[in-house]
Image (cartoon, rainbow, N blue to C red):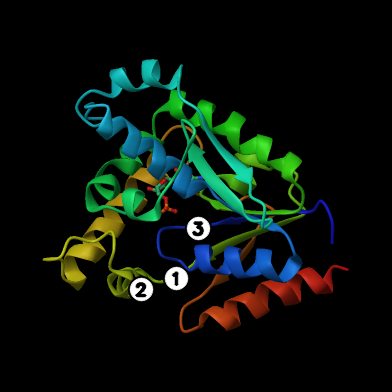
């Protein structure tokens, strides 16, 4: 399959990252994680000494000179670069980034800036792009659109097991509260809120493992061919 675009949206810890990555591998396509782009920008803002929650007006001027893009590497995979440097997962999965990323992602100037950069990814070939507004805003003509969900309890459990971005003293209840707050901000923002596109297939991943989610998506794609 060449040149197809697959949009995978859904709330935090709904299983979309793993599904998108495995699906891209299976289809021989490229995996684009737009959440990583928002996280990278948030890291850059914090490193520039700006608090995006208290000083949102200081964010737009920073964007004018910043460069964020996915590049194809020699092994065929995509790597995210920020101002010419390869982005490292450990830098963008930190708790302080998780705390501000939804606030950064709701700024209209940020969304417009990202829209241009995310649409550029279409030129890379077959892509599986995951995020919150891919099916609704970034790739409205995507070949397939999926919206993955899971109950708040299951999502909190998954995020808790991932570690990394959660503070060491966190427990299941604090992780659940953080996810709920992130979903609230993402779903209620004025520009490009988290919601399924009218033509998206909504899939509840409760009780499914990663292979089962992948098989479900592949079955829908193969059914259409
Ligand atoms: O998928 P994630 O949890 O890594 O995303 C981090 C944050 O970025 C999340 O709070 C929502 C935001 N985001 C967004 O608003 N739009 C996207 N397309 C992707 C992520």
Badge 2 element? helix
Q: Position of residue 151 (x, y in %)?
A: 39, 71
Q: Separation of disc 1 and disc 2 at Cα?
A: 10 Å
Q: Residue furthest right?
A: 225
Q: Separation of disc 2 and disc 3 at Cα?
A: 14 Å
User: Which sits earlier in the primary sequence, circle 2 or circle 3?
Assistant: 3
Q: Position of residue 62 (x, y in %)?
A: 37, 20
Q: As drawn, is 192 to the left or to the right of 77?
A: left
Question: Quick check: is the Cβ at mark 3 less than 8 Å away from ligand 1?
Answer: no
Which label lies toward us, 2 or 3? 2
Q: Which residue is mark 2?
A: 158
Q: As drawn, is 184 to the left or to the right of 69?
A: left
Q: Residue furthest left?
A: 169
Q: State the residue in front, 43 or 179.
A: 43
Q: Which residue is mark 1?
A: 150
Q: Residue at the spot x=17%, y=64% of the render?
A: 174
Residues under numbered marks 2 and 3 in contact, where contact means CB atoms less than 8 Å apart: no
Q: Residue at the spot x=52%, y=27% of the render?
A: 113
Looking at the rendered structure, which numbered label has been put on residue 165?
A: none
Residue 59 in the image: above or below residue 152: above
Residues under numbered marks 1 and 2 in contact, where contact means CB atoms less than 8 Å apart: yes
């Amino acid at each position: 399959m060449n040149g197809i675009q697959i949009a995978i949206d859904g709330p935090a810890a709904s299983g979309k990252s793993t599904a998108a990555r495995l699906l891209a591998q299976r289809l021989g396509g490229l995996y684009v994680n737009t959440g990583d782009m928002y996280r990278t920008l948030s890291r850059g803002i914090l490193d520039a000494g700006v608090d995006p929650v208290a000083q949102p007006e200081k964010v737009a001027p920073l964007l004018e000179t910043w460069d964020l893009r996915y590049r194809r590497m020699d092994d065929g995979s995509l790597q995210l670069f920020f101002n010419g440097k390869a982005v490292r997962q450990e830098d963008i999965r930190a708790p302080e980034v998780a705390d501000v990323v939804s606030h950064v992602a709701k700024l209209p100037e940020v969304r417009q800036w990202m829209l241009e950069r995310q649409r550029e990814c279409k030129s890379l070939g077959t892509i599986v792009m995951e995020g919150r507004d891919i099916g609704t805003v970034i790739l409205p003509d995507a070949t397939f659109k999926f919206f993955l969900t899971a109950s708040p309890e299951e999502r909190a459990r998954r995020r808790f097991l991932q570690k990394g971005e959660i503070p060491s003293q966190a427990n299941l209840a604090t992780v659940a509260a953080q996810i709920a707050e992130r979903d609230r901000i993402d779903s209620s923002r004025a520009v490009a809120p988290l919601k399924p596109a009218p033509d998206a297939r909504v899939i509840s991943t409760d009780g499914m493992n990663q292979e089962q989610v992948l098989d479900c998506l592949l079955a829908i794609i193969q059914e259409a061919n």
